[in-house]
Structures are given as C-alpha cells and as structure tokens.
Amino acid sequence: MGSDLSNEIMRRRTFAIISHPDAGKTTLTEKFLLYGGQINLAGSVKGKATARHAVSDWMDIEKERGISVTSSVLQFEYDGKCINILDTPGHQDFSEDTYRTLMAADSAVMVIDGAKGVEPQTRKLFKVCGRRGIPVFTFINKMDREALDSFDLIDEIEKELGIATCPVNWPIGSGKDFKGVYDRESGNIVGFSGTEKGTKGGEEIRIPLSDEEASLKAIGEEAREKLVNEIELLDGASEPFDQEMVNKGKLSPVFFGSALTNFGVEIFLQNFLKMTMSPLPRVSDAGVIDPVERGFSAFVFKIQANMNKAHRDRIAFMRICSGKFEAGMDVYHVQGEKEVRLIQPQQMMADDRHVVDKAYAGDIIGVFDPGIYSIGDSICAPGDRFKFSGIPTFAPEHFSRVRQVDTMKRKQFVKGIMQIAEEGAIQIFQEENYGMEEIIVGVVGVLQFEVLQYRLKNEYNVEIILERLPYEHIRWIRNRDTDPATITGTSDMKRVRDLKGNPLLLFVNSWSIGMTLERNEGLELDEFSEN
Ligand code: G4P
C-alpha cells in the first residue's frame, strides 16, 4: 500500500456540523474556511455573502422550483489536514437527508447558542449521533451576548443529551463583559486586542493566568477573580479529558466562543483536529473495511433528484470509505450487480463546485446518476462485492393521507410517488388491508409535503390532495413474529406497513407508546428501521 495513499487518507477529517437554526452554524463554518485560508474576508458582510452565495449556487436550481433539500459538503485545508464539513440542512429544509448526512460523517460538531442552551433540532440530531456512537464536540456560541450561566449550560447538555462533558476552554464573562476564553490545557487567557467584528480579528493575545500582573491588566480584577474561582470549581467537578471516551461518543469536549467575533474559534479548530479521528473503518457484510488497506469503496447516502428537469437527472452523493477514487475508473455497483463508471464526479471546494479527478477515503463525491442508485448502495473496486450495512430509515414526524384529484392517472401517480420515495424524500405507508388505494405519506420535515405536491404536478402531471393526519410518532415493531392485529393498542393507534411490508404503529402522542408497551408484554418498538 503506497504511503502517499495512506498519508492522504490519514490526514482527512470528515465531520458534520449540527445545530438548531440560528445557533451560528453558518458563521462558524465560514470562520473555519477563513482560518483555512480558503476565503479572503475583506469585510465580514462581503465575506459572509460570498460564502453564502457559493453554497446557495448549488441549490439555486432546486430553490427556483421550490425545492430545497440539499446538504452541502465543503472541503478545505488547515494545518496539513484535509477537512470535509458536511452541512446539515435546518429550518424548513430539515428532512431525512439531515439525518442521513450524519451517516457519512466520522464525528459531529454541535453548535449551541449560549443564550438558549439545548434546542429541539439539536436534540434530534444528537440522538442520531448517539445511535452511531460517533464523537460529538460541542461549541457553545454567541458568548459575546448575554449567555446562560456556563455551569448551567454544561449541566443542561449532560442531562438533556445524556452525555458526559469536558470543557476544554472556559469563557471569561459573557455579553458586554466577554473578555475571551481560558484555555485549560495551557493555562492561558486567550483574547484579541482590538477585535474587529467578523474579520480574523486583531492580534491574538495569550497571557498565562498565573502571571497575575499581566492577566489582571488584561481582564481586570473582578473577571480574574471570578475566573480563578470557576476554574477551581471546574477542575474539581468536571470529567477529565479521556480520548477513548471521546472516540466512543461518551464524552463531549466542550468549547466556548463567539463565531462572529472569532473568540475561541481557532482554539476549537486546533483542538478538534487533534481529538477527532481520520476516516473510520466501516462495517460491511465482508467484515470491517479498513480505509487504507482496502481498494476503493463508497456508499450512497443521499440522492438529489432532478437537477435538470428536462432529463430526470439525479446526483448520488457518496462517502468514500476506503482507498482512492480516480476519474474514469470502473467500479462495481453491488446492489445493481454490475460494473459502472462514475460519471462527472464533483466535489465542493470552499467556494466552487468542480469535477474531481481523484478523491480519497473520507471524501464525499457527487456523481451523475442515471437512475440506478438507491440510498445505502455500495460501490466497490472491480472484484470486490461487499455491501456496507444499510442506512437506517428515520422516524417521520408528520403524516398525511394522499388522494389523487384525477383517479384516471393512477399509473403516473403510483410511479411518481414510488420514485420520490425511492430517492428518500418521503416515506410511504399503507394502511392494513388497503394496499395502494390509501397511501399515507410520512416526512421528517413538513416542507417535504410541498416538495411532493410540487414534483408530482411538475414532473408527473398528477395533482394530489394532502389531508394532514394527527399522528406524530411512528414505531417499527421489532418482534418479527408478532401479528400487528393482536397488539392491544390505545384508541389513537393506527396499524400500517411500509413499502417493504414491515408492520408499524402510528401514535398521536408519546404517552400512548408507553401505554401500548405496558399492555403488550415483550413487545419491542423502535424509532429507526435498520433495513
Ligand atoms: P445558523 O447557520 O446556525 O442558522 O446560524 P447563522 O450562522 O446564520 O447565525 C444566525 C445569526 O446569529 C446571524 O445573525 C449571525 O450573524 C449571528 N451569530 C452567529 N454567531 C454569532 C456570535 O458568536 N455572536 C453573535 N452575537 N451573533 C452571532 P443574523 O442577524 O440572523 O444574520 P446576519 O444578518 O448577521 O447575516
């Protein structure tokens, strides 16, 4: 195995960035790119606009058509490392794609607004990280605004998310009294002189807290005294740093900062890159696939439909799991059972999308999909035939009954809705004993209902009426031999099947789930489907 190949793979870091909308994910990402020297920020507004523009270009075609389901991937270099950031779409764009993106990452950075603490979307995404056991790093942002008490924030993360934390740095005040952060490892106070909002900032200053005179001068008596007390408390109470625990996703290193004013951003980046891992081995039906030892392999984690409406183009996003990809190489599509060539492989580099001629384990490429790939498909070097374990199906939270306006167009309707479901934008359920006559559609984010309606009309010329249903929870039945008809449920419970024929239960409220479990001894319900 060439050492160049090994070096290229080992220097890669692929992580997803997750947050509740407005916590500062975009701002932090832009600052990473800035430290990586990828964008030249003449001024914050311009720089921000440039970066935003770059990202949105990728989505424009979709946006015009009222569809925005993209999560973008950015690659940049910092300190000899090649970093892939997977953005997870939020706001109304929140969809199953957001969850799937986490399947392609080796770790996650969770951005939390210091004034708000843990918010619903963070909680949901965190749950998926937890299930995969990937390392989660926490960046508590907006410390330049009035924030909640730092100890309370840490406490909330631990309690709400059920993970131990280890603060790597500690904020010195917040809001107008925010003076920077204290780096626990070096014992330095890190601040900026003359920080200019949104730029790389003024001169970074590092003063040892132990240098009483200099630190007093830098942050003042009151702030210093408070800091000394807090650090003492922290040293006594918090978990020690333990890389093993971080790797297992059981301990989250916590960083405080302000993405907007750059405080704590570079400390975060430097420590994060030390603590996170190079591309992880992946489980397949042929055992664990080592990223360096094996030839090229990848799996599809996202399909973006109809970039070009004239042809039913799709782009399949793949995470490379092992080896090296080279343009023009023939590969084997395991689920399709044939050799294929990956066409027009693309990658996003900070501010543009370009065709790649080589990529390594850890990288994400988007390839032209003539309609052959499905989510979870494996691609191997010719000669290999292994399949990576599948991407779970995530529980939708919104449900509608779908009816056609013109029942004569039955065939187009079924074809359209099946294709859209195949791409993973929606999930289809059938009521027991009704077949395709009565279809229930489930989505993770409500925007997907509009996407469905729009696409059926525009691409398949089929009009539908959506009737919202009150269900909010869905559970797959783990006990394979249980006949759903024998389950004693609550009055709000509905029995359905997914496209694979798996039995599921729909509930209006979570209380009913507990009640149903209580009434049926041995019944096991799951929020995810693993096949
Ligand atoms: P998101 O991607 O997580 O949704 O958040 P985004 O970075 O877009 O940030 C949301 C808002 O919070 C933005 O303000 C951004 O400038 C602000 N923000 C981000 N980080 C910090 C921080 O560390 N401190 C403070 N004070 N504000 C921060 P906006 O007014 O909504 O947008 P814009 O007009 O500034 O672009």
Image (cartoon, grey):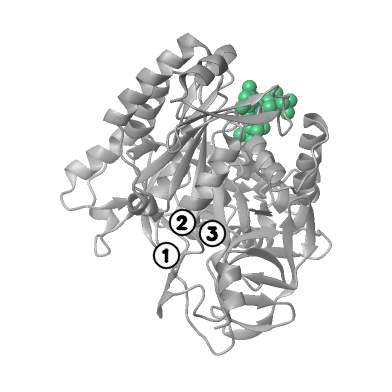
12 left or right, relative to 242:
right
Q: Gap between marks 1 and 2, in whole Å?
A: 7 Å
Residue 190 spot, x, y in % from top left: 55, 29
Q: Quadrant of residue 260?
A: top right
**Residue 459 in sight:** yes
For marks 1 and 2, the one nearer the N-term is: 2
Query: With respect to residue 13, does 373 lie above or below?
Result: below
Q: Residue at position x 42%, y 23% from top?
A: 150
Q: Residues within 10 Å of mark 1 (few under 14, many from 20)?
A: few
Which residue is disc 3 drawn over? 104
Q: How far apart are the alpha carbons under marks 1 and 3? A: 17 Å
User: Residue 247 sits in which quadrant?
Assistant: bottom left
Under mark 2, the amino acid is: Thr
Above-or-below relation of 446 to 276 = above
Please name whichever residue, 517 or 105, is drawn nearer the observer in this view of the structure: 105
* Structural crowding at the residue carrying mark 3, measured as other residues with C-alpha within 10 Å and reported as few (<14), some (14–19) or many (≥20): many
From the viewer's side, name the closer residue of 521 and 466.
521
User: Residue at the spot x=53%, y=59% of the render?
Assistant: 104
